[in-house]
Amino acid sequence: MTQSKIRVRFAPSPTGALHMGGARTAIYNWLFARANDGDFLLRIEDTDVQRSKKELVDQILSSVKWLGMDWDEAPVFQSKRFNLYNKYIEQLLNSGNAYPCFCTKEELELERKNNQIYQYSGRCKNLSQDEILRNMKNNKPYSIRFKIPDGVTRWKDKVYKKIEVKNEEIDDFIIKRSDGNPTYQLAVVADDIEMKITHVIRGEDHISNTPKQIRLYLALGQTPPIFAHLPLLLGIDGKRLSKRHGATGVDEYKNLGYPSDAVFNYLTLLGWAPKSNKEILKINEIIEKFSLTEISKKSAVFDIKKMDWVSGQHLSIEKTEKIKKELIPLYKKKYLINDFDIAEKSDYLSSVIDLLKERAKNYNNFIEWGEYFFKSPTNYDEQTVKKYWNSTDVNIYMEKIVESFKKIDNWESKEIENVVRNSADNLNIKAAQVIHPLRIAVTGLGVSPDIFKIIQLIGKNSVIARLNKAIIELPYELFNKPER
RNA sequence: GGCGCAUUCGUCUAGUGGUUAGGACGCUGGCCUCUCACGCCGGUAGCAGGGGUUCGACUCCCCUAUGCGCUACCA
């Protein structure tokens, strides 16, 4: 028997930016396709014309792309396929699997409210042909409902295993609204049939839609696809991930400076665990190891702390050139470099990145933590000054350092370090007593990477200039003057 | 209210009848050290509760609790 090609789809509705939950659904679909030599398709579910926004479509697509995913066919827009859906509705009507319902929205709401029932009464299910014709003649608006047969509906979910629902629990749901538009349930099934989708991988919130859709497939004489429902993504409080949990949009994480590989990796880890203990994985490795049946059934809490860790790990193993590419626009934005000196500063940038990438959690950190690589500090961290530049003796130490720096021919970190340590010895003080002030003078900060490497990079002239500036501006007394 | 699904350290998870319940993040003690990170060595903390089944249950069954989802002419 020839197994038909695996085809999956990600089907967002453009009513908001792509959020982390949706992104994970997309990722699992994509991973499954790529791992099985299948097709990954995109479908925009915009049957609710009022709520759907065009701009959001582009936004969502660019987020999918940013995460490193590609799709194999042009995205399908449901809003452009109403003819197709009508064909299916027609078929259902003709085969006696659907019927017109003349109840108005208000009537239905009232019924629910008064009777404390939540299900459709089935009032229009058994209308006679005459009644139907009469209503239509009177131009009474109507929707089309799908007729649920007796029995039970069950399927073997790839993630949740066996699920079974009694058909009496399923409403005769509406497949065509009184305004003539198809509903989600119908459109999904029609499209999944047309697009030859073999596996439907989606959020757990769709479990209760599944029996309805299976019934639709059956009534249409089709074999339902294989379903795999994914546990939901929760906020730190255990509630479904939403705006009030802070950043939830993929675009927001992009702007916060998280590398896409890291976001992809972390999202993958929420509900799925690689067999080995290695958690930091490149996309290719994930494709290799990924399996649908290993997905957890439990909703997962999105933990930004672990996201940060994953992100930091990715950055520290990422190629410097790759990071540089991401960083250049950010440096430009901050006016730390410009189009004219990019080429000339390329190697310099690489060295800066190498110094910072082990500690950075995101791209923005490179900017926040590294301004001193591009300009002299304009102010000095007060706490650090109080702690380490705590007497005018320090000024004397620094003057000595300047003197010895001037004599260095081989401006290289090891040599610089030797000189500094020797100076401290000569002054009969601990190396730390000069190293800390050195850091303040050069970076303005109390923390930084290896100060000797920084000094090497920044260059002899600039370092000496910074030291001289600090010597003038930083006698402890300045900071100690009583406020008035 | 009904229906569905879930329940292993605070969080992400491994585990499929016999394990000192493993790993990771976090937190934390220490080492390294010029600071901060990184790295390394430790520590902390968990099978929701109750009944069964069984020689033996985290693992199988039932009940309860809790959480989440759906219950729209939204998707």
Image: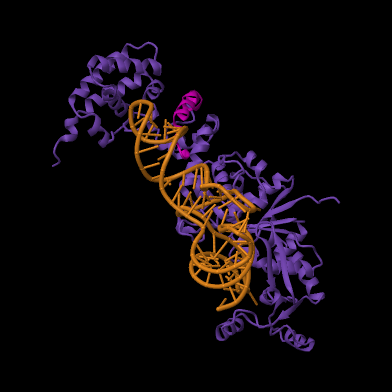
Q: Position of residue A285 (x, y in %)?
A: 63, 39
- Which lettered chain is shown in orange? B
Residue A84 placement, left or right of B75: right
On the question of residue A92 being in view, the answer is: yes
User: Toward the viewer: A326 or A341?
Assistant: A326
- The answer to if A349 sits in the magenta stretch is yes
The residue lying furthest to the right in this view is A1
Q: Position of residue A341 (x, y in %)?
A: 47, 26
Image colouring:
by chain
- Residue pictured at 35% horizontal, 18% vertical: A417
**Quarter the C terminus of chain A occupies:** top left
Residue A286 placement, left or right of A451: right
Relative to A202, does residue A404 appear above or below in the rendering?
A: above
Quadrant assignment, res A227: bottom right
Count how many numbered circles sit on residues in the image: 0
- Residue pictured at 80% horizontal, 68% vertical: A220
Quadrant assignment, res A51: bottom right
Quadrant assignment, res A223: bottom right
Chief secondary structure of the magenta span? helix
Q: Position of residue B13 (x, y in %)?
A: 57, 50
Q: In the rendered image of this protein, which colour is used for chain A? A: purple
- Residue pictured at 26% horizontal, 22% vertical: A430
On the question of residue A58 being in view, the answer is: no
Relative to A107, does residue A294 appear above or below in the rendering?
A: above
- The answer to if A424 sits in the magenta stretch is no
Per the rendered image, the range of residues in magenta is: A342-363
